[in-house]
Amino acid sequence: QSVLTQPPSASGTPGQRVTISCSGSSSNIGSNTVNWYQQLPGTAPKLLIYSNNQRPSGVPDRFSGSKSGTSASLAISGLQSEDEADYYCAAWDDSLNGFWVFGGGTKLTVL
Amino acid sequence: EVQLVESGGVVVQPGGSLRLSCAASGFTFDDYTMHWVRQAPGKGLEWVSLISWDGGSTYYADSVKGRFTISRDNSKNSLYLQMNSLRTEDTALYYCAKDGVVRGVTEYFQHWGQGTLVTVSS
């Protein structure tokens, strides 16, 4: 099981707003920023959100991130069919010598 | 344009060794921490290791500590992963990833390669 907890699946219809949660602990999300990655079917992951709520250039503003305490969320508004993908949260964990941890991933289906 | 091209993935027997390579271009390689991240078939992402921009710091996931060694050659813009004592559970697509912070430790995986497949099987 993954250190960060995400729901395994989420769904929505075109135009809807969906959110994906990511729960961690004081040693990871509680003390470091959260990043989100999108993995379209058959492709490499792509950075979607970094530093909790920053979008790299080229990422539509339909995607937004937030963090509170030891949890984070990714919101997708105006859902489109091309948003169907796996989404992963990640954070640095300060325990032991330090290491990166991922959530187990959430498969988003656009109905 | 940033490009990361992994190579070296093959089928190897349990207990065997393998070295993966990642050729980088399109950015100043020796300014950035580099990572290896893997994905077992049908599974999620698992971070494997990182090496700082100057090679002075390395970190490993517990699952590979003592068996894998990350290294880089800044003169060749290349990243490596020496994998020893391979196990069936090491079977995965291995991605090379560039960090997003200049001459820092690590902040996020900004760019990813397409991956190279390692299969550990008898």
Image (cartoon, helix red, strand yellow):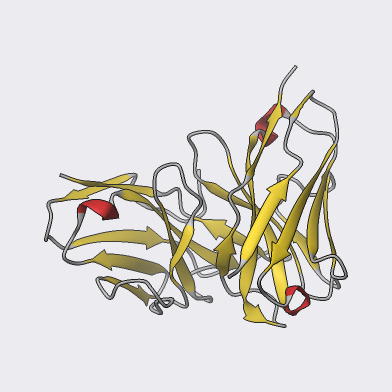
Q: Is residue A94 among the parts visible in the rendering?
A: no
Which image quadrant for residue B76?
bottom right
Q: Position of residue A11 (x, y in %)?
A: 20, 48
Q: Residue at x 73, y 45 (%)?
A: B7
**Residue B1 as seen in the image, left or right of residue B67:** left
Q: Residue at x 28, y 76 (%)?
A: A61
Which image quadrant for residue B12?
top right
Q: Position of residue A8 (x, y in %)?
A: 34, 44
Q: Position of residue A97 (x, y in %)?
A: 73, 65
Q: Residue furthest bottom?
A: B103
Is the C terminus of chain A in the top left, top right, bottom left or bottom right quadrant? top left
Q: Residue at x 48, y 65 (%)?
A: A25
Q: Is residue B51 among the parts visible in the rendering?
A: yes
Q: Nearer the viewer, residue B30 or A25?
A: B30
Q: In the image, is residue B115 above or below residue A71?
A: above
Q: Nearer the viewer, residue A38 or B78?
A: B78
